Image: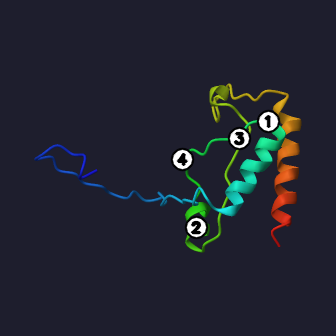
Amino acid sequence: LHEAAPAGATIEVEELEGSTRPGLVAADAPVIKIAQDAFENTFGIRPILTRSGGTLPIMPALADKGIPTILTGFALPESNIHSPNERMLVEFFPRGIDTIRELYTRLGDLT
């Protein structure tokens, strides 16, 4: 923020009560590749990785311990997630189940 602020601007950042730090998993972490492979196998296209905001305090706690996490879903951007008219395509339900089954199988193979 300081680097992007115009000359003479004052920047103050205050962490509010109840907020949490972000959790970040490296894009090249083995579990991320496994998840991408599972999605590609069931949906026919490799998913892109995006960063998004949210309030899941467990994510940075796990990241601090070196535990990589996968946070994903099966809805499209136009699905209005968490809104009164949230929706998901019916055909995504069985494909989602297949993806998770494959993901868990591949994760189990890590041990």
Q: Looking at numbered disc 4 in the image, what kind of residue is underneath it?
A: Arg
Q: Do the residues labelled 1 and 2 touch (CB within 8 Å)?
A: no
Q: Are marks 3 and 4 in contact (CB under 8 Å)?
A: no
Q: What element carries label 4?
A: loop
Quarter of the rendering occupied by the C terminus: bottom right
Residue 4 pos. (x, y %): 25, 46
Residue placed at 52% from the left, 47% from the top?
53
Q: Mark 4 points at which residue?
A: 51
Q: Looking at numbered disc 2 in the image, what kind of residue is underneath it?
A: Ala
Q: Name the residue under label 2.
A: 63
Q: Name the residue under label 1.
A: 44
Residue 104 pos. (x, y %): 84, 58
Q: What element carries label 2?
A: helix
Residue placed at 67% from the left, 28% from the top?
79
Which disc is residue 46 wearing? 3
Q: Distance between the residues labelled 3 and 1?
A: 7 Å
Q: Is mark 1 on a helix, strand or loop?
A: loop
Q: Looking at numbered disc 1 in the image, what kind of residue is underneath it?
A: Gly
Q: How far apart are marks 1 and 2 (CA)?
A: 30 Å
Q: Are marks 2 and 4 in contact (CB under 8 Å)?
A: no
Judged left or right of residue 68, residue 40 is right
Residue 83 pos. (x, y %): 63, 31
